[in-house]
Structure formats: structure tokens, C-alpha cells
Amino acid sequence: MNRRDKELLEKLLPMFKIEAHEHLTKISSGLIEIEKAEPEKQAEIVETIYRESHSLKGAARAVNLSEIVAICQSMENVFSAFKRKEMTPSSELLDLLLGAVDCALRLAVHEGPSGAESFELKNLLQALEHATRKQYVAPPGPEADAGGPGFADKADGKSGFESIEQAGELEPAKRITLSAPLPRITETIRISTVKLDSLLLRAEEMLSIKLAAGQRLEELKELKTRFDHWKKEILGRKSFDAALPSRDRDAMVNSAVSLILSFEPAMAGLIKEAEYDKRSFGAMVDTLLEDMKQTLMLPFSSLLEMFPMLVRELTKEAGKEADLGCEGSDIEVDRRVLEELKDPLIHLVRNCIDHGIEKPADRIAKGKPPRGKIRIAASSSDGKIAIAVSDDGAGISAYEIKEAALGKEAVSHEEGDSRDEEDALSLIFRSGVTTSSIITDISGRGLGLAIVRERVEKLNGTVRVASQPGIGTTLEIAVPLTIATFRGVLVRVGGDLFFLPSANIERVARVKREEIRTVENRETLSIEGQAISLARLGAVLELRAMGSRPQGEGPFIQVALLSAAGKRMAFLIDEVLHEQEILVKPLGPQLSRVRNIAGATLLANGKVVPILNVADLMISAEKMAFPPTEAVVDRPPQRISVLVVEDSITARALLRTILEAAGYEVATAVDGIDAITSLKTRPFDLVISDVDMPRMNGFDLTARIRADKELSNIPVVLVTALDSREDKERGVDVGANAYIVKSSFEQSNLLEVIRRLV
């Protein structure tokens, strides 16, 4: 390849990656739809994915990615057979095709195969060829070639494109030429998101110019007011100084009058120009910022593309059946918001399958259809997008959630008793709280929903849950459509300034101090006939000397009534200054998560002001109201003893080294019989066991431990190479607390599981 072709190829590859992702996403979605579509609909889908594969093949040829060309060729052979109804889209064949799509996507990203991928590609192509030869033989004659080049086998066993290339009629280097006529300019172009982000940042920073222009205008108006006062005072005086000669006094009066008369129109003109500048700057900045926001707005469907495949894989792995329905896919959302929502939505959909949807036999026994339903529905209003993820599964028991939270000491007994059913359900967002009977490599740690809440609150959003046992569960996320700017109220607490998001403020008011009541050791106010918890903002933020002294002076106090996640709470402040549009500045990776703080912004005078996270404030205020019990605070540390049961010397030594380095006391056993002997000899806090062992395996050992009254409460972690769904289910049945697959084993993962169990 000459230098010119190489340079051209370097320019084309980034565009090809984007195009490949689009084609492969459509093929993947089509393959998943085929599985549940009616026969007449299947033909339409096959035609679509065949065309997508054919287009991708041509694009891959243009950038000399022959491996992707080969995959597309093999998929086209299968799709051709589908079209001719000589093959049926069985589940096994669809799995193979989806694997081909995944392989092609990785090849596109890496611009070619690695050693391992080359081996995988070879096996994949052989499997596709075997599938077509086993189930489909192209009939001879012109009908075999009706689909075009590379569509059906030729008499010489080669595809149409292969024959052309080998005949030398089309050389790769000549497939693209710069001398060809340029295509007509279209209304859309592709541009790097990094460049767009940088451009948006510059546009956002112009908001400070708009705010500064408004600040200068206010300063000029204040100066005009002072000037008018001085003018009135000067012109109202009969004389300046009686001690001065009359001629000097007259000269001073005339000079002052002349100065006033010349200065006044100049100031009036300056104020008029400043007002014009403010309007002009404001309109231009607002328009530019809005246009830039729109360039980064993507349809919600761009995030939904991955979920049909995800649901299919997870339900298959879990031995369950479920259909996914999506609504509101055309709603446009800031790309940065979509990126932040990706992981939370994955966690929610995973929870629907892991904890919600029952197995087919269980659903039939409950009078439900064997296939469950998962629904992702989006709607927008008032600059926010609300996303509801729901399932028609087993639902959540508020009682079990409360018991799990108490067991993990995530709440005190006092706080747990004070929560109604809706409040108890919200405890699932606390770290470590889970009702899962076993910890596996994908669920049961109680971290997923805690991560969801953290990500959502980072976007200044809210998350709530509603559930009916036996009927289903809905989790709703509400976040702003864009994260660039929003309205905020500037408040003062002592000598510090903070912004509260206007969307979280129900009202601000002055109330009498004597209206504060203490109920169950908590300060409350009666607002509109409802008792509202009251917190002192200075104390919650742990400001200097603000924790105990009353805020403000006089008989009245300033209160801001805030709401978030369906909760309301009043916060005591010193002063409400004003409301304005603010530009959110993230805290940076070094301070990615600061309690009670969502970000920061700049005032027109250059002062940095924190933006408060209202949901965090409420949690912090609740913790102040319910301090940890003495039993939790004063419990002395203890050395935890672990029994490792493993027949492999190497694995046994590895586990012992990891655990002892983490501070645990470790003993070992070579199989289940040896472990039972050790457990009868001395007490242990936890057992970690392999499954496949001589004499007594890990399943039988776990069952023996659960059947023994003296040992039944000891947590058991199974660490094994057996990763099938049936093995995991057997681990649950015999009473294991955690099931970790060795292929996905990580040291930190094991230590985190142990920390949660003991």
C-alpha cells in the first residue's frame, strides 16, 4: 500500500467504526426480533438484516478489513437460506449469528484480530459454514445467484465477489479514488464528540459574560441612584461655604452645576448602552448555548439499542423467559446524561431478571403466563426525563427489606420502626442491603441499587420505587434532559454562600421561632397543616460554629422547604439572596463524590459557590436525627477466622495468602470430610470451599453444615470452576451464601464478599 492509500485508510477507519456499529446494532436487533416474530414478519426482518450485512461487507472491503468481510459473507449465506425458507432461525443458530455480530464489532474496534480473536474467528466461520452445509445446499442454476454477488455458492464453490477479485477485475487499492466526483453535501455530518464537548464547554463559559453584563448594569444603576441623590443635595444648597468670597462661591456652584449637566446625559447614555448590551449578549449567549445543547442531544433509543440483547442473554443464563417493551424512544436527551444513565439502567434491568421475573414453572403455578414482561418507559416534561423500569415479577416485600437493612446495620432499630411501607422500600438503595439468598458474580451484594442512586443524584435527579408482592415492581428515575445549566437560588448560611436547585425548592418563608416544635427528639415545623422535619443547614454541612447556635436573629427565621425523591424537609438558612441561571461545573475526578455537594458555579464577580445536592442533604439530616447505636459504635474489632477447603495445593496456598494479607486468621482443609473435622474441633466465622473435591464435595459439605445445629449459622462461600446455571442453583438449594466462579475470580471481589458476610 502506497503512502497516499495509507493516509486515506487512516482517515476512513474512524468513519468505518461508526458505520460498522450502526449496521451491527441493526443486525443484532433484527436477530433478536426474529426469535419472537410471526413468520410473515420474519421475512421482512431477514430482508433488512441481509441488506445491513451486505452494506457492512462493502464498507469493510473499502478499509481492507477482510476478516469482517468474511463474517458478513458467512452471515449472508445464512440470511439467504432464511429468505429461501431452506433454513429456520433456531435458537442455536441465532446464538451463533449473534456471536458473529459480536466478533465483527470487536474486530471493527480493534481494526483487526488479535491472536486469540483469529482463533475465535476461524472457529466461528467454520461453525457458520457447517450450519449452512448441514441444513442448506444452494440449488444450481440462475436462482442460486438471484441475491447478487456473494449471496449463493457458484459452481466452482466460490462466491461471486471472490471470483471477481481473483480474476483481477477489482483491485483493493483502486476501490476508492480521490479523483471520483464528490458526493452532494448532505444536511448531516459526523464529528468527534470530543470536539463537540469542547465547543459546548466554550459556549457554556459565555454564560459568565451574560451574567457579568447584568452585574455591570446593576452597578451602573446603583451609581446613577447615588449620583441622583448627590445632584439633589448639591442643587438644593444655597451656598457652599459662607467663609468664601461670593465670587468664589458662585464659581463653585456654577462649576458643580456644569459638571452635573455634562455628567448626567453621559451616565444615562452609558446605562442605555449597558441595557442594550445585556439584552444582546443575553440573547446571543442563550441562542448559542441552546443550539450547542441541541447538537449533543440524542434520541433515547440510542441507549435502548443494547437492552434487547442484554435481556435475551440474562434470561437465558437465569433459565427464565421475558419480553422487553420500550416506550418514549424518540425523546432527545443530552449525550452526557445518556452516558451516565447507561450503568443505572443496566442495573435496573438486571434486577428485574435476577430478583423480579420468576421461572416459567413458578409463574404458571401463580397463574401467570410463562414469559414475563419487562418495560422501559420514558416520558419528558419540565426539562426532565422520567424513566420507569418495571416488571411483572415477584415484587418486593417491605418487611424483608427492612429486616435485611437491620441485619446489615444500615439503619438503627429506631429509624426502621419509624418507616412506613413506602419508606421501607427505599432502603433498597442503601449500600449492602439485599434480600438475595446468595451472592454470585453478578448479584446479591446490595451494591447495584446503591450505585443507581449515586449516579442519578450526581445528575441532580431522583429515584423511587413502588412494588406489590406477587404483582411486580417499578423503579422510576427522573433526571434533567441536559446537565449544562439550570435555575438556582443563592442562599447565605453564616458567612458562606450556596446554591439550591430551584427544581427542589417548594417554597421559602419566614416563620416565627416559637413555631418550631420538638417531636421525638426531632425539630419540626407545621407547614400547611403538615408536620415537616426541620434541619439546620449549617449543622448538616458541618460549618464552623454553626452546629449548635440558632441561625439568624430576631423573632423570625428563614426556612427553605425542599423536596426530593418524594420526601419533604425544611432547612434553616440565614438569607435568600436571589434566583439566577447557573452553569454547573463538575468537581473533577479528584472530588468525584463529595457528600452534600453536586458541583460548583461561578458568580459574576468570580466567586466560586458550591451547588448543594438536596437528596444528600436529606440523608445527612436523617443520620443526624438517628445516630448509630452504641452497640454499633463501640463494638471492638475482632480477628475473623476463616476455614479454606480446597484439594488443590496451589489454589489453597493462593487463598491463604490473600486472606492472611487482609488480616484474617486462616486454617485449611483438603476436602469436605477434613473440613467437618476441623469445624467440630474449633469455631470458625466463615467457610470458603471448592466444589469438586474427593470424599466429600463442596455441595455436600454445605448441606452438612446447614443440617448441623451448632454449625448452621456459619456463612459458606463456594469458589469453583463450575459456572453453569444448574450448579449455581444447586449452591442456592444447599444453603451457600455466595457462589464465586473461578474464571471471573478477583481478589477484591472475594474480600468484599467476606466483608459483607461476617
Image: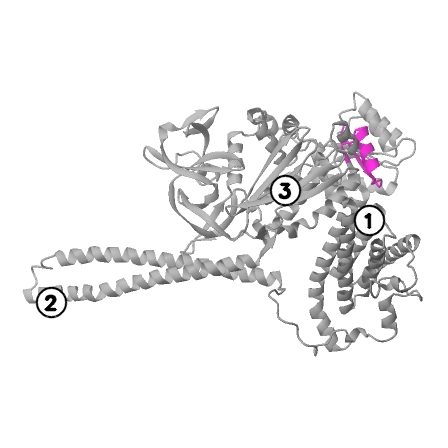
Q: Earlier in the sequence, mark 1 or mark 2?
A: 1
Which disc number belongs to residue 251? 2
**Circle 3 sits in a helix, a strand or a loop, which is it?**
helix
Which amino acid type corresponds to the residue marked 2 in the rendered image? Ala
**Circle 2 sits in a helix, a strand or a loop, which is it?**
helix
Give residue 114's position: percent from left, percent from top.
81, 60
The residue that disc 3 covers is 451
Give residue 615's position: percent from left, percent from top.
53, 39
Crowding near the residue tagged with mark 3, few <14, some 14–19, many ≥20 C-alpha atoms within 10 Å:
some
Where on the picture, by quarter, is residue 357? top right
Between residue 366 and residue 198, name the one nearer to us.
366
Which disc number belongs to residue 95? 1
Marks 2/3: CA–CA distance:
78 Å
Which amino acid type corresponds to the residue marked 1 in the rendered image? Asp
Residue at 41% x, 44% y: name it. 491
Marks 3/1: CA–CA distance:
31 Å
Give residue 417's position: percent from left, percent from top.
57, 24
Point out the stretch of residues depicted in magenta. Answer: 714-738
Marks 1/2: CA–CA distance:
100 Å
**Which residue is situated farthest in the left direction here?**
246
Q: Quadrant of the N terminus?
A: bottom right
Residue at 81% x, 29% y: name it. 733
Q: In the shown orientation, is residue 586 left or right of residue 720?
A: left
Q: Earlier in the sequence, mark 2 or mark 3?
A: 2
Between residue 544 and residue 357, name the one nearer to us.
357
Crowding near the residue tagged with mark 1, few <14, some 14–19, many ≥20 C-alpha atoms within 10 Å:
some
